[in-house]
Image (cartoon, rainbow, N blue to C red):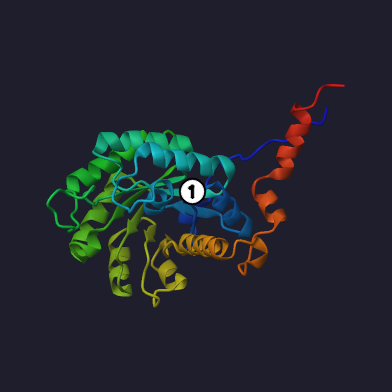
Amino acid sequence: MIPAPALPTSRPTVSAIRAALSGSDCETPATVFDPVSARIASEVGFQTAILAGSIASHVQLAAPDWIVLTLTELAHSVRNICRASSISLVVDADHGFGNPLNVVRSVEELEHAGADAITIEDTDLPAAFGGRGKERLISREEAQAKLRAALYARSNAATVIVGRSSCLRIEGLDETIVRLQLFEQCGVDALMVIGLENEAQLAAIARATQLPLCCGPVPAALGSEQLAAHRVRWRITGHHAYAIAMRALYEAYCQLHQRGDPADYSLAQASAEDLQRWMRGEQFARLKNSFMQVPQ
């Protein structure tokens, strides 16, 4: 009998995300949303990826990023991605799905599903009734409690816990610095800032803190080298790959509906070889030969 090949995929002992935090460059994780996208990102050279809450909500529910996705649904996505790929995955866990006790459960579930890094933010979520769409923050004390709970809950010291703040766009720079310093005191591994508008803000934050920094989309004037010089070790540039993929799907359906004949498609398509490689077709064929044949 042919020896059966090992199916995917062992997770690295030290994640690329943690290694990046110890480095000197600013990396850009790929946006992934399912096992195939994670495999493609890994194949083209990405070592790190992010599953954003907004993207998970769109993929799983076709719903906006309004905290209608459940922890169970997010963990299911994480598990499928991590089972199929060894890419180092950052998971946007929003507010931790509730109070500090809920954060404990969230970190347990996401870490068990394979997350290498988990971000917990200080935005008051879900939106309050009667709030008229205005963003609000939880108190400094609750934000600290959530991060301490996240650190308590992780079972693997290699799992990266990131304290994320939206304070800059809500209450300004001074309060942001205070909060980030409090996050550091909790013992998190990195700090994430959303809403940076210029290098002066970033420089002030870098001077006032010690931990590696992460950020969301920033103005074009802030390139990777400038970000790295201010201790930014990874940044999220937006989820363009997902938007491009959705547009391609829309165009394909339009052509199929209007023309009917696949021979008339004008869009580029993945080859049969690509599809086989991304689904590990050869490995499954060997498994079939190993386990689905009558012994001779």
Q: Quadrant of residue 159?
A: top left
Q: Is residue 149 above or below residue 133?
A: above
Residue at the outermost right position:
296
Residue under the point 54% across and 65% down: 258
User: Horizontal and vertical percent for residue 115?
Assistant: 46, 43
User: Residue at the spot x=48%, y=51% of the render?
Assistant: 33
Mark 1, residue position: 89
Closer-to-camera residue (277/5): 277
> Which image quarter: residue 257?
bottom right
- In this view, the residue in front, 248 or 55, is 248
Q: Say whether residue 157 is left or right of residue 64.
A: right
Q: Considering the image in quadrants, where does the N terminus appear?
A: top right
In this view, the residue in front, 213 or 262, is 262
Q: Quadrant of the C terminus?
A: top right
| Residue 215 visible here | yes
Residue at the far bottom in the pictured view: 221
Looking at the picture, how far across and down is residue 243, in whole percent? 46, 62
Q: How many marks?
A: 1
Please indicate whether residue 140 sits to the left or right of residue 293 in the image: left
Q: Is residue 84 above or below residue 29?
A: above
**Residue 156 visible in rendering:** no
- Image coords of residue 49 (percent x, y): 50, 54
- Label 1 environment density (alpha carbons within 10 Å; few <14, some 14–19, many ≥20): many
- Amino acid of disc 1: Leu
Q: Is residue 170 above or below residue 155?
A: below
Comparing 280 with 107, the one in front is 280
Q: Position of residue 223 (x, y in %)?
A: 44, 73
Judged from the image, the secondary structure of the residue bearing numbered disc 1 is strand
Which residue is at a point 82% across and 31% down the rendered structure image?
Answer: 2
**Left/right of residue 14 with respect to residue 76 in the rendered view:** right
The image shows residue 237, relative to residue 137, as above or below, that is: below
Toward the top, the furthest residue is 295
